[in-house]
Image: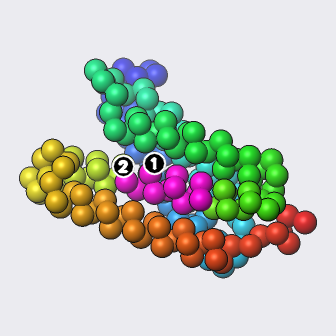
Amino acid sequence: MILGLSTAEFTLLHVIISVIAIVSGFIVLGAMYANKYLSGWTALFLLTTALTSITGFFFPNAKITPAQVFGALTLIIMVPTLVGLYGVHLRAAWRWIYIGGVVIILFLNVFVVVAQTFAKVPVLHALAPTASEPPFLISELVVLVIFGLLGILALIKFHPERQFA
């Protein structure tokens, strides 16, 4: 039992929250390319991402897992991201900090999904049983490169100064 739910129920809740976080994150990132700020989607992305990270700590583990490390990193990165957005309204360098935060947070979510997919899907697990084999490493490298490019595009395209004036 975790917070009054069976482990299976809690896992399902965690996965649903994670999917909402990832989908809303891609919507927020996509809006950046159109130089739009979507306040509701952004709030949903940040909230569900925080909930994903927090709920990840409730799973019973004998040791700290990579997913928990990524969850902690996500929560740490969320602090300046939230300050940049809600505290100083993306003024000056805070625009870069916010964009970088969004991209990194979304990347970390997707990184964990790829890792979980390799761990849980039998065909992929057979290709990389220890998550240190080339198929896993190449997959995560491709995700990293894609998010690096997405981040650069967001920095170029997203200039919401007039929206917060």
Q: Nearer the viewer, residue 148 or 54?
A: 148
- From the image, which quarter does the C terminus lie in? bottom right
Q: Residue at x 85, y 64 (%)?
A: 164
Q: Mark on residue 144?
A: none
Q: Nearer the viewer, residue 68 or 26?
A: 68
Q: Position of residue 77 (x, y in %)?
A: 58, 45
Q: Position of residue 31 (x, y in %)?
A: 64, 72
Q: Residue at x 32, y 63 (%)?
A: 141
Marks 2 and 1, Cα distance to the nearest angstrom?
10 Å
Q: Amino acid at mark 2?
A: Val
Residue occupied by mark 1? 18
Indicate yes or no whether the magenta region holds residue 104: yes
Type of colouring: rainbow
Residue occupied by mark 2? 112
Q: Nearer the viewer, residue 117 or 111?
A: 111
- Give the mark, 2 or 1, whose residue is nearer the N terminus: 1
- Name, please, the residue furthest toward the left: 126
Q: Does residue 140 appear to the left or right of 79 in the view shown?
A: left
In the rendered structure, are the residues bearing label 2 and label 1 in contact, judged by CB atoms less than 8 Å apart?
Answer: yes
Q: Position of residue 99 (x, y in %)?
A: 63, 61
- Name, please, the residue furthest toward the front: 93
Please, what is the dominant secondary structure of the magenta stretch?
Answer: helix
Q: Secondary structure at mark 2?
A: helix
